Image (tube, grey):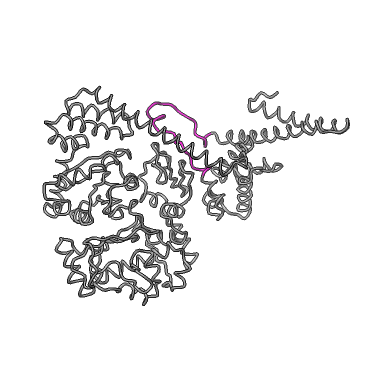
Amino acid sequence: MISKEIIEEIKARADILDVVSDYVNLKKAGSNFRGFSPFNNEKTPSFFVVPSKGFFKDFSSGKAGDSISFLMEMEGMSYMEAIRQLGQKYGITIEEEEPTEEELLAKNERDSLYIVMKFAAQWYQDHLWKQEEGQAIGLTYFHERGFSDETIRAFDLGYSPDLWDGLIQEAKAKSYNVELLEKAGLVVRKDEAKVYDRFRGRVMFPIHSLTGRVIAFGARMLSKPSAPGFDQPKYINSPETDIYHKSHVLYGIYQAKQAIRQEDNAFLVEGYTDVISMYQAGIQNVVASSGTSLTHEQIKLISRYTKNITVLFDGDAAGIKASVRGIDMILEGGLNVKAVVLPEGEDPDSYARKLGGTAFTKYVKEHQQDFIRFKIALFQGEAQQDPIKKAGIIRDIVTSISKIPDPIQRQVYLKESGDLLNMDESILLTELNKIHLQQHRSAQKKTAFEETYAAEEEEEVFSEYEPAEEPSKGKIYYREKEITRLLLLYGQLEVEENFKVFHYIFKELEDLTIQTDIYQQIHQLYRQKSEAGQAVTEATLAEAGIPEITQEVIDLVVEHYVLSDNWELKYNIYVPRETSILHQVIERSILELKFAYLEKLIQENRQKLLEAADTESQMKVLEAHHVLKNSQMEIARYLGIVVS
């Protein structure tokens, strides 16, 4: 367990801007920061961070919260996991007892998987640095590859001894559950009696999450396994688990993310050693696709930090052509892509070691090409004398251009392609339109099929029931929402000595009852805290421990749109700020709320008039109606509203 005092210290130290910036590329927008949603694909950034309040708000998905809830959403962490992660980030010592087997079993299974992966990673590292076999085989191999001790430690590299069940025995000695090792992909079970280590006699490459936790391993065999009858491939990787989905992970992203943001570019390579050698050469903005074909999820991961990718290809023509599909996927993701082909027989690992960082960087700058020039150069030689092949290449180029979401970029690349291929741009444009038309028709057919299937399924399953209609939110809801927003933002401002905005709002509404449940709760909580002598802020309400209130408070105080400074600085267009006319804003908001209440009371009174059984009852209702109508007319005159 973590003490309450430590938790409060971590929450106080956690900087929302710092935490979110590990995942999202943010740009200043007024007093806030804005970026693309890490939860949804979007073309217009609608993710906001408000440092002054310690909140984030994602308008595309509706998610909102503080540093802790952000980590919980991004990493699938529990609350205590997020606390531990933040404690580690800010160097706050968290004293916890070593978990027993019973405690491990009581934890969420994901938490347990992270724990056993951390244990395994440390065991592999200990064998690399402290055991004779690891030093003689594993450490020697890494040194022969040119990796320094500092680099080896930076990537947590290790060695798994050539033992049948070395990890299993160590885990049992430390009271770790062998079933968890199996679920983490660390051991293999043939039957109830036969369980053995997955990785034996191999150097180990831990794969980290964005926050630095070990989630999987890649492993390379260096010697023939001692156990007879178990021939194994040279390279093996962890299987998919609850914490590891290889299509969502990039090797080296934990070490590279800050450099990618600083350089505004990511180098994309194939292998673990490519990443490590370039990192050691001083080129740290490099990641690998972890032995898989590039995926949309991996591209989205890179796009959190930069919109620019440079793909490095080994000097092998056949391998390049097999990998070139990834470029189209990068374009489709809205990123800018360049390609670099290394000399024949070289890969990023060997070439970075051969040239060193400065010369390697120079080579990349001199040889990088945009994807049009790269693809034309790749295929043009073999199709020079073959019109059929040349037509196929042209279609391939135009298909790549069709993937680009930005129409202006598409037009620029069409023109460049026409110049390079010596073709009329209008012909390429016609081909592009054909491709878009085909894509549109395919999408329509798919949508029609899905809608038909869904309709048939719904009719089959739900035909006996009529869906309930959600009641629309009326004027009162929106008026109560606005007055609650003003209370949260400006409640602590002084109107005069010892009399603040919240005093004024509560005094004006003392004879009324807030009707929307969530806003009623917020007003009550605000009253309770202020009557207890607390200076109530958005943060204190958001931290009250009521998720619905936290969500609503953040929704109310985080603005989706920010007024650009250019309106005043560049165009001399002055828009009054809310704070400069706050008295009028609050007064009008209160009157609009009262007007909405009166409208509702008048409607209810009309119904009472219809239901009145005798003349005396009718007269009482009419008197009440007259009072309500007069009050409504008085407010309407102030608001400039015409009522009938």
Most foreground residue, 586 or 392: 392
- Quarter occupied by residue 387: top left
Magenta run includes residue 561: yes
Residue 568, image x, y percentages: 41, 29
- Quarter occupied by residue 510: top right
Determine the residue positioned at 41% across, 55% down: 75
Magenta run includes residue 111: no
Task: Indicate left or right for 628 with 440 as reference.
Answer: right
Q: Tell me the quadrant of the picture where the C terminus can be found.
A: top right
Residue 9, image x, y percentages: 45, 61
Residue 378, image x, y percentages: 16, 38
Most foreground residue, 447 or 490: 447
Task: Indicate left or right for 534 with 508 as reference.
Answer: left
Residue 33 in view, yes or no? no
Q: Where 251 sits versus 326, above or below?
A: below
Task: Indicate left or right for 192 with 126 as reference.
Answer: right
Q: Main secondary structure of the magenta part?
A: loop
Q: How many marks?
A: 0
Residue 531 in view, yes or no? yes
Determine the residue positioned at 63% across, 34% down: 475
Most foreground residue, 30 or 456: 456
Residue numbers of the magenta segment? 555-580
Task: Indicate left or right for 260 with 606 as reference.
Answer: left
Residue 358, image x, y percentages: 14, 49
